[in-house]
Amino acid sequence: MPFMFKKFDLLAPIVENICLGGKYYRIRVEAPQIAKIARPGQFCMIRPQYSGESLLRRPFSIAAVRDGELLEFAYTAIGVGTRLISQSLPGQHLLCLGPLGNSFPVVEGSRALVVGGGIGIAPFPFFNRVLNQHRIFPNTYYGARSAEELIYIEELNQLSHILKIATDNGSAGHHGFVTQLLEKDLDESPSDSVIYACGPGPMMRVVKSIAERYGVPAYLSMEETMGCGVGICIGCPIPGVTPDGQTTYYLCCKDGPIFPSTVVMI
């Protein structure tokens, strides 16, 4: 299921780079060529301009397009590359290749159930805004370790029919897993629902299981370490099945990152 679209490889000036709290950051870059064609769920491969040839670019979900020309990414500064990005200043540049990958499908007339865990919430400010343009106002379920790690709360609240929060330590919203909130709502009304999810592996496995149990379609945005982002290095395989039931491997970057839950084995 490869998706081949136009993409750009450019030096993008940084216009903002701020800490949202703890290890969470938001960076905005000027990249109108990419911003004009980007779709929700797609990603860019980025790294600081001066970071050494040994540092590979890393995939960042596009969190928003602002003013038609700014790309926004949310990220956690936990590795060498992301710590360098967190130290980048406005006026400096990022090497930015994108937009890459496929996008979340908008299913007209559906009840959209959006599930984000941790930094997996990143694609949903963009996606929820596009859903709103189709007059779809999703139920958004957002899980984090604690209240301090919740980001985009005000924007997600504005772009959702309802925003439900779960935290591991109970410091905000439901004390427990975000998938428990999803399951409770599907118990009450599974009809016409479509699930869209992005987050850590254990959460995605539970979402896939819930989708199968309730018989609702689900689209999973998979997170994998990528070397190139365009299917050359073959470094991001995901086990799956073909439509006729044969086992196979998909490339997260080239075939995804978004897959129907029925075709991936997680």
Image (tube, rainbow, N blue to C red):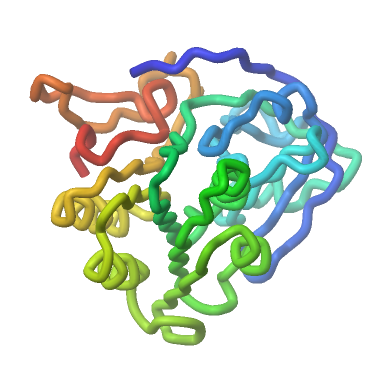
Left or right position of 136 against 64 = left
Question: Which residue is depicted at the point 53% across and 55% down?
Answer: 137
Image position, residue 44 (x, y; %): 60, 31
Quarter of the image containing the C terminus? top left
Report the number of numbered marks.
Answer: 0
Question: Which residue is depicted at the point 31% across and 59% down?
Answer: 203
Left or right position of 81 against 65 = left
Q: Residue furthest left?
A: 245
Left or right position of 162 against 32 = left
113 lies above or below 89: below
Image position, residue 29 (x, y; %): 79, 38
Residue 230 seen by the camera:
yes
Residue 82 seen by the camera:
no
Question: Which residue is depicted at the point 39% across and 35% down?
Answer: 258
Image position, residue 128 (x, y; %): 56, 50
Near-viewer residue (178 or 127) = 127
Image position, residue 19 (x, y; %): 73, 63
Q: Can you tell which quarter of the image residue 130 is in?
A: top right
Question: Which residue is depicted at the point 44% across and 17% down?
Answer: 3
Q: Can you tell which quarter of the image residue 107 is in?
A: top left
95 lies above or below 203: above
Quarter of the image containing the N terminus? top left
Near-viewer residue (43 or 45) = 43
Q: Residue furthest right?
A: 91
Near-viewer residue (221 or 127) = 127
